[in-house]
Amino acid sequence: MGLSIESKPSDGHDLIVDCQTCGAKVAIEPHMRTARCAYCASPQVVERPRDAGLEQPAFALPFIFDKERASAKVKRWIRKHGLFARSGFKAEAVAGIRGLYLPVYLYGAEAHAHYSADIGENYTETETYTTTDSNGNTTTRTRTVVRTEWRQLQGLYSTWIRDVLVTASAGVENSELEAVEPFDLRALGRFTPAVIAGWAAEEATMGRSESTDLAREEARHKVETELAAFMPGDHHRNLHHETSVRNEMADLCLMPIWVFAVRYDEDEAPLRVLVNGQTGLVGGKVPRSWIKILIATGLGLAVVALIVLAIAGS
């Protein structure tokens, strides 16, 4: 869709464009790709003109969960995690709900790990022992015991790391994204402006190199998990590895996210809760009430003390 640019500021302020449906002035926030006209609710995309310095998305994933279903998910999540939450949080004061496309990098690489570990193999032995009863009589018995023989193992492990998602937004930490993963990437499609029509879409505000560093670290954790499962024997310990990656691929993608501001205290900033717009998985942190935790702990100790006293009295 065409648009008329009134101003293109370089100081981080909103960009003002003309809606081509009704002619109203539409402000596109800094770091956002799109806006929806508030006057005519046009379903067309009012898209920020391309900046030669900004990377364009390669893929996008459509929304499945609508606003009502996402809100219901958050309310159930609050009830589930609200046992020791602050009272204001339990009141489910959900405000500022917003659906947006979050920029992420989809990373893949060939990984090679030089590893070493101690491998334990179980075996059984029969041993003889003696016992003495209450009358002083000694009895000789046998029993089967399990022992472990350890040996050192080292080698090279190679694998392909796929489907690692890391944030490309300076405003959303990678841990927040991980809390609402996984996404079903089989539904991933090529990006076109029509895919994000009517939705806010953020520009990538983290550099490719910074996001790739996060992806490499996550890839190494995946290799460590695979190595632990790969180890032979009955046990392993002292697992160490040096992992390198090659043939890296990283595509900028837009992922559907519902963002909720949960205000639990008028004097505190809203707590952010994210919902996976495809699966409905909820992630966030619950503000704990230490008073409730101390009361619950005190009641628990009191119950234990009463039980001990009752047993001692009997």
Image: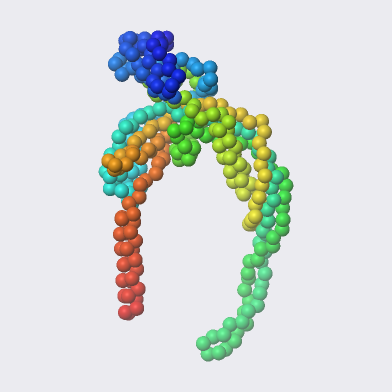
| In the foreground, 168 or 84 | 168
Residue at point 67% right, 58% down? 120
Is residue 72 left or right of 30 when viewed as pictured?
left
Residue at point 31% right, 18% down? 38
Is residue 30 left or right of 104 when viewed as pictured?
left
Total numbered labels? 0
Q: Quadrant of residue 272?
A: top left
165 up-or-down from 138: above or below: above
178 up-or-down from 14: above or below: below
Q: Position of residue 265 (x, y in %)?
A: 29, 43
Q: Position of residue 75 (x, y in %)?
A: 32, 40
Q: Quadrant of residue 270?
A: top left
Residue at point 45% right, 19% down? 10
Name the image quarter holding the N terminus.
Answer: top left
Q: Quadrant of residue 278?
A: top left
Name the outermost residue toward the front.
11
Q: Is residue 104 visible?
A: no
